[in-house]
Image (tube, rainbow, N blue to C red):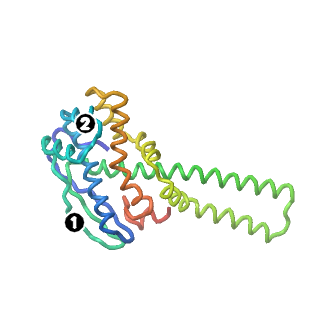
Amino acid sequence: MAIATGAAVNDLMPTRFYLQGKWSLDEFEVLFRSFNDIYRLIAEFTVKAGSVTSFVHVSSPFHRGRINRVARKQGIPPLRVLRFNYSSPGHFDLLGLGKVAEVAKDALFGIADRIIGSEDRELDRDRKLLENVSLQAQTTREITDSYLKRTHDAELHDLEVAERRGAIERAAVALTAEKVEAAAKGLDVFSKILTIAKENGASEEDISRMLSGFVAKVEPIIPLILVGKLLAEPFSDSRDNR
């Protein structure tokens, strides 16, 4: 997805999130504060890149006060809540600059999907190992008992059904900054931002510090996605099968 530039810089567009389950005020605070930071950072690096040097050579990158000052300097409009429907399921719309908020949203869910995908691969290996062991046992014993055969098939079916749920649960429990950073590195928007930083004189150490700064902004929201509270699409669509 292209980020707003040029003629689209003054356009405001809505971005929708979907809600599921019970939310606390602390969770809403984390979501809105962190997402607002991510939105402004992406806008500052991609809409008007002239001030990115403000973030290149700093010991503590992406401090909220600095983010806000640069946003005001660049004339980047703040996110506004356009509408809010709190229920289970519910949704809210944020009005922001061009497609920047949509890019930020895609980045968040892209990171979560990559983290879940890594857990999926581990579970798939476990499932295949179980299948191989079971097949070997079946070959050597030449199982003829129909009850054992049904039990064997049921175990494999239950494992397959639980695979996605297990991946999400494991990803939520085992979430680390390292996992978030590894997932973020593969996203196009972060690659472009770090390229812009390099063009403005950022060293490898600066790049590493900046990536950690992005992770610090993204990391608080990822658990809300992994446990199914924050959704990119309505629960009745693709995510209810996970």
- In this view, 146 is above or below 31: below
Q: Amino acid at mark 1?
A: Arg
Q: Which residue does the image show at 15% across and 50% down from the upper left?
A: 77
- In this view, 38 is above or below 30: above
Q: Nearer the viewer, mark 2 or mark 1?
A: 2
- The answer to whether 227 appears left or right of 103 in the picture is right
**Disc 2 crowd, CA 10 A, few/some/many (<14, 14-19, 20+):** many
- The answer to whether 41 appears left or right of 6 in the picture is right
Q: Which residue does the image show at 87% across and 59% down from the upper left?
A: 141
* Residue 135: percent from left, percent from top: 77, 55
Which of disc 1 and disc 2 is earlier in sequence?
A: 2
Q: Quadrant of residue 162?
A: bottom right
Cα distance between the residues tagged 2 and 1: 33 Å
- The answer to whether 79 appears left or right of 114 in the picture is left
Disc 2 element: helix
- In this view, 185 is above or below 237: above
Residue pointed to by mark 1: 83
Q: Quadrant of residue 95?
A: bottom left
**Disc 1 crowd, CA 10 A, few/some/many (<14, 14-19, 20+):** few
* Residue 236: percent from left, percent from top: 42, 68
Quadrant of image for the N terminus:
top left
- Rendered image: mark on residue 235: none
- Rendered image: mark on residue 55: 2
* Residue 81: percent from left, percent from top: 20, 61
Q: Amino acid at mark 2?
A: Phe
* Residue 50: percent from left, percent from top: 18, 33
Q: Quadrant of residue 223?
A: bottom left
Q: Which residue does the image show at 37% across and 65% down from the upper left?
A: 234
Disc 1 element: strand
In depth, the one of 232 and 21 nearer the eye is 21
